[in-house]
């Protein structure tokens, strides 16, 4: 196969000619051509090895043999739609139900996180009879038109905010209005949601749902203060709405302590709807919505069928079951806890050494590093963050993520060499003389 591969420059030229520039590449100044992957490793056309630190899709490792085998074996027997009776779909729903609070017991299977969130929006509106949605600032919930409308991260650069969308402050205790020194940031941020809801109601609006990633990722790898969701849910339900927990990037054991990130908010908190995607299929297009009986029944009462051509197919469900089996067999949830704790400790040491590291936050293998130019003002060090990641890619051969001034670490839960990656990241910082102050890093090749 390698002999048939075209040169990297030719691939890039074809992509630039045939693929829209809206479909962006990682590291556009010098794109990496990845031709294969295994476990936590990715390989370019020259055979160079990279450790993938932003693999929130290849959840149990790239091309895991048990997942590949499950897809292959089912593909050899049957792959059709969910209108036929088949064991895989009910076995998979049952296995998922065992990981969730008992109230979340009705399942819909789809192909992507965007489809899942779009369905969640429909379910919420049918159940409540209301239209409006409350979302968090900087949120991103998918690429469908309905989801762009509830994603400030996107709509602020497009058509702007719709009248039925209401934006609450991100519960960010590092950069938000209520910070780490506030006596009760959970209540303070929840009261902001209450204020947003009241303001909407004064205009005659009716709230259908509050949408939030259980741990906001695009918004900055944010860890909401404990108790925040419970208080928000109280305000939303009092207004007649439901709580939708978007677990697409953070579910399936990534946080280590719990299987679902919303469980970090306490055992008494239960969303009305949970959406899943990305890691659910380890790269196979699978997604899911879990809802309570009342929400599902209201949707069924419309008499309109919900059918998804490929959602819940025997192959997709076989893959989903295989991912759950690997998570359990290889104890990857515990692994995420132990490795994540060590990474947080290591990055905490870098925070002490380098004033440019303003904040280190995370849980399990969901970690963010907030780089700053000045400790007092916390001015985002955007260029510096991009420089560190690109330099690490070039010199240390690892693939990390950056969003603005924040470096993201979301590797496969099976990663064993992630610690080495962070040591390499540390060395990159040590090489920069000006990192010792809060001055700008040298931005040079």
Image (cartoon, rainbow, N blue to C red):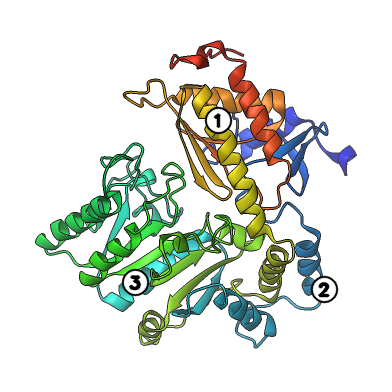
Observer-side mark, 3 or 2, equals 3
User: Dot 3, how many residues are within 10 Å of its Cα: few (below 14), some (14-19), or many (20+)?
Assistant: many
Q: Which mark is residue 289?
A: none
Q: Mark 3 points at which residue?
A: 124
Q: Is residue 39 above or below residue 100?
A: above
- Foreground tag (2 vs 1): 1
Pointer 1 residue: 349
| Element marked by disc 1 | helix
Q: State how far apart marks 2 and 1 are (Cα).
A: 51 Å
**Which residue is at a point 35% across and 43% down the rendered structure image?**
172
Residue 412 percent location from the top left of the image = 66, 50
Label 3 sits on a secondary structure element that is helix
The percent position of residue 120, horizontal first and vertical second, equals 41, 68
Which class describes the residues within 10 Å of circle 1: few (<14), some (14-19), or many (20+)? some
Mark 2, residue position:
76
Q: Is mark 2 on a helix, strand or loop?
A: loop
Tell me if I can see residue 30 in this picture: no
> Which residue is at the front of the view, 183 or 66?
183
């Amino acid at each position: 196969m390698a002999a048939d591969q075209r040169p990297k420059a030719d691939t890039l030229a074809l992509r630039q000619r045939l693929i829209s520039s809206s479909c962006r590449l990682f590291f556009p100044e010098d794109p990496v051509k990845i031709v294969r992957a295994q476990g936590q490793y990715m390989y370019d056309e020259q055979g160079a090895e990279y450790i993938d630190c932003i693999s929130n899709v290849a959840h149990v490792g790239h091309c895991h043999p048990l997942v590949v085998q499950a897809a292959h074996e089912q593909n050899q027997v049957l792959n059709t739609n969910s209108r036929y009776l088949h064991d895989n779909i009910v076995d998979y729903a049952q296995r998922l139900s065992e990981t969730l609070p008992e109230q979340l017991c009705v399942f819909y299977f789809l192909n992507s996180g965007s489809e899942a969130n779009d369905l969640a929006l429909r379910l919420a509106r049918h159940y409540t009879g209301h239209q409006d949605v409350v979302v968090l600032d900087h949120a991103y919930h998918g690429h469908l038109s309905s989801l762009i409308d509830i994603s400030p991260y996107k709509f602020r650069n497009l058509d702007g905010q719709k009248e039925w969308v209401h934006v609450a402050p991100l519960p960010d205790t590092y950069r938000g209005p209520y910070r780490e020194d506030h006596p009760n940031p959970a209540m303070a941020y929840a009261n902001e949601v209450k204020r947003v809801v009241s303001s909407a109601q004064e205009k005659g609006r009716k709230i259908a749902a509050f949408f939030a990633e259980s741990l906001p990722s695009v918004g900055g790898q944010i860890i909401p203060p404990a108790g925040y969701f419970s208080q928000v849910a109280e305000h939303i339900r009092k207004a007649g709405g439901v709580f939708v927990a978007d677990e697409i990037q953070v579910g399936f054991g990534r946080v280590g302590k719990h299987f679902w990130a919303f469980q970090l908010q306490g055992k008494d908190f239960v969303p009305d709807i949970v959406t899943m995607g990305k890691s659910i299929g380890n790269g196979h297009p699978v997604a899911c919505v879990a809802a309570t009986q009342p929400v599902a029944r209201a949707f069924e009462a419309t008499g309109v069928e919900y059918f998804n051509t490929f959602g819940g197919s025997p192959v997709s469900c076989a893959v989903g079951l295989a991912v759950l089996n690997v998570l359990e067999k290889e104890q990857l949830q515990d692994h995420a806890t132990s490795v994540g704790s060590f990474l947080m400790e290591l990055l905490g040491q870098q925070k002490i050494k380098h004033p440019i590291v303003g904040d280190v936050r995370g849980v399990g293998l969901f970690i963010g590093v907030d780089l700053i130019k000045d400790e007092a003002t916390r001015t985002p060090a955007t260029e510096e963050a991009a420089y560190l990641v690109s330099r690490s890619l070039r010199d240390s051969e690892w693939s990390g993520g950056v969003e603005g001034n924040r470096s993201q670490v979301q590797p496969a839960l099976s990663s064993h060499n992630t610690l080495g990656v962070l040591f390499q990241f540390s060395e990159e910082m040590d090489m920069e003389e000006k990192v010792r102050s809060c001055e700008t890093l040298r931005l040079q090749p």
